Image (spheres, coloured by chain):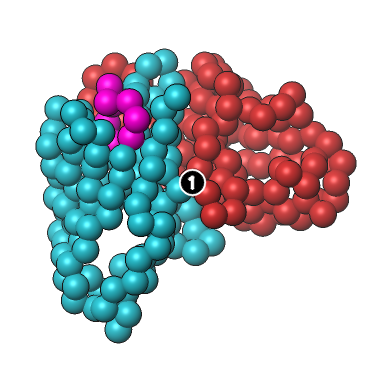
Amino acid sequence: GAGVSQSPRYKVAKRGQDVALRCDPISGHVSLFWYQQALGQGPEFLTYFQNEAQLDKSGLPSDRFFAERPEGSVSTLKIQRTQQEDSAVYLCASSSKKLAGGPNEQFFGPGTRLTVL
Amino acid sequence: KQEVTQIPAALSVPEGENLVLNCSFTDSAIYNLQWFRQDPGKGLTSLLLIQSSQREQTSGRLNASLDKSSGRSTLYIAASQPGDSATYLCASNYGGATNKLIFGTGTLLAVQP
């Protein structure tokens, strides 16, 4: 069974460009998370999907950030008009359980390293 | 505010030594706590998950404990090896509608051969 995959692994963008980052979760996983990890820091929560529903987007830093998961599997994180402060590693994680009952271990992908020049 | 702190920020030990990494969290109403390993330029590998009802979990040379009342978790690594060199992150989960993880800033471990 494949793990969580992300593409591209590296992305360099000029300030002001739009970027799209893709996440393929583990097959059958209901929950999908996006996190942002700045250099030397722990990951910080951005947004959460349960199937196709975006249930929490409280961590998105601005309205330039947008995420979707239209069919409840693959997810895309889009950043419009990128700024230098957006430079970070963007991590995707998936989990097999809904909220209620049992452990909900999160499994992470390798991340996309975004550099905005 | 729910926060997670890890001490020390960096640790260097000789091969074969046993070591303890510390994690503290401000809100004791924790649902579970997860320990991860991160290698340079890589994603996070889950090591152990401890439910709030558990006191510890073991996997091979790793043992993680959880003390909700004191807001602390420890990761014990026995007989350390150079391959254990990595950044170790702990993350708390308070459940709710999201089950989002709140991470510490990590402990950078170097095991010297």
Question: Does B26 appear in magenta?
Answer: yes
Residue A97 visible at all:
no
Q: Quadrant of residue B17?
A: bottom left
B110 to the left or right of A57: left
In which quadrant of the rendered image does the C terminus of chain B lie? bottom left
A60 to the left or right of B12: right
Question: Does A116 appear in magenta?
Answer: no
Residue bounds of the magenta highlight? B25-33
Q: Is residue B4 above or below residue B35?
A: above
Which chain wears cyan? B
- How crowded is the residue under tag 1: few (<14 C-alpha within 10 Å), some, or many (20+)? many
Query: Residue, x 80% and y 40% (percent of image)?
Result: A82
Q: Position of residue B13 (x, y in %)?
A: 29, 73
Q: Amino acid at mark 1?
A: Gly
Query: Residue, x 51% and y 25% (percent of image)?
Result: A48
Q: Position of residue A6 (x, y in %)?
A: 56, 47
Query: Residue, x 85% and y 46% (percent of image)?
Result: A15
A35 to the left or right of B97: right
Chain to which mark 1 belongs: A
Query: Residue, x 48% and y 31% (percent of image)?
Result: A32
In which quadrant of the rendered image does the N terminus of chain B lie? top left
Q: Position of residue A45 (x, y in %)?
A: 52, 33
Kind of element beneath mark 1: loop
Query: What shade does chain A have?
Result: red
